Image: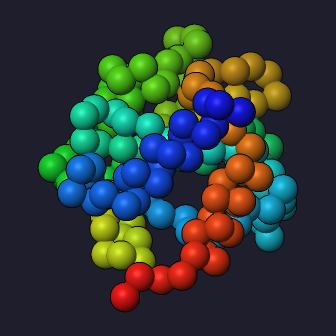
Amino acid sequence: MAYVDEKLTFLQDCLEHPGKYLPIVDHVWQTFPARNEFDEVNIGWNAGLIDGKRPFFCECWADGCTVITYFISTEGIEDYTVGQLEEMLSNADIISYNCQEHYEASAMTFTDHSGNEFYSVNMVVGDEEKTYTDGGMIFSFSYLNKFNQKRNKAPSES
């Protein structure tokens, strides 16, 4: 529980001090059910720093295979390839491959409700046959849901 509290404190610090970090995707408006409308299983989340100022947020989910989606600000790395994004996550010890063969990652960009652009990097963790990628610790969405519900109920600052 202490480690998840550290992650939530980090997430809150990123959100409350935008000048200290590059943007981090904000899911304040979202709660994660055990299964979503597409029958995907929502497994969990994590957040941390890739480097001194670049945070990541990830979601782990399953739909026939288990996938981790990493959300990373495009600021300063607007032209990165999927390979460069994988290498960045690997060099920061956020991901590692368990075997030579693995699914190719995919990436796309999107703009969030605050106007920040992010990469959405999808990596297959495993399928029915084996585990290909280690994406680190994953925390239950129940912790993030409570965090978001508390933030949604907080009085807005004027």
Q: Residue drawn at (27%, 49%), measured in percent from left and top?
A: 21
Q: Residue furthest top?
A: 99
Quadrant of the rendered image containing residue 50: top left
Q: Residue drawn at (36%, 44%), measured in percent from left and top?
A: 55
Q: Residue drawn at (36%, 76%), measured in percent from left and top?
A: 114
Q: How many numbered marks appear? A: 0
Residue 19: image location, x then y, percent: 21, 57
Which quadrant of the figure contains the N terminus? Answer: top right
In the picture shown, does residue 95 fall above or below 32?
above
Residue 45: image location, x then y, percent: 62, 44
Judge from the rendering whether residue 25 lies leftward or rightward of residue 36; answer left or right: left
Q: Residue furthest left?
A: 76
Residue 72: image location, x then y, percent: 37, 49
In the picture shown, does residue 158 fall above or below 50?
below
- Which color mode does the image show? rainbow
Q: Of residues 19 and 155, which is closer to you in this image?
A: 155
Judge from the rendering whether residue 85 lies leftward or rightward of residue 77; answer left or right: right
Q: Residue furthest bottom?
A: 158
Residue 48: image location, x then y, percent: 44, 37
Q: Of residues 135 and 102, which is closer to you in this image?
A: 135
In the picture shown, does residue 76 fall above or below 36?
above
Q: Residue drawn at (42%, 77%), measured in percent from left and top?
A: 113
Which quadrant of the figure contains the C terminus? Answer: bottom left
Q: Of residues 31 and 120, which is closer to you in this image?
A: 31
Q: Is residue 108 visible?
A: no
Judge from the rendering whether residue 60 lies leftward or rightward of residue 38; answer left or right: left
Q: Is residue 139 visible?
A: yes
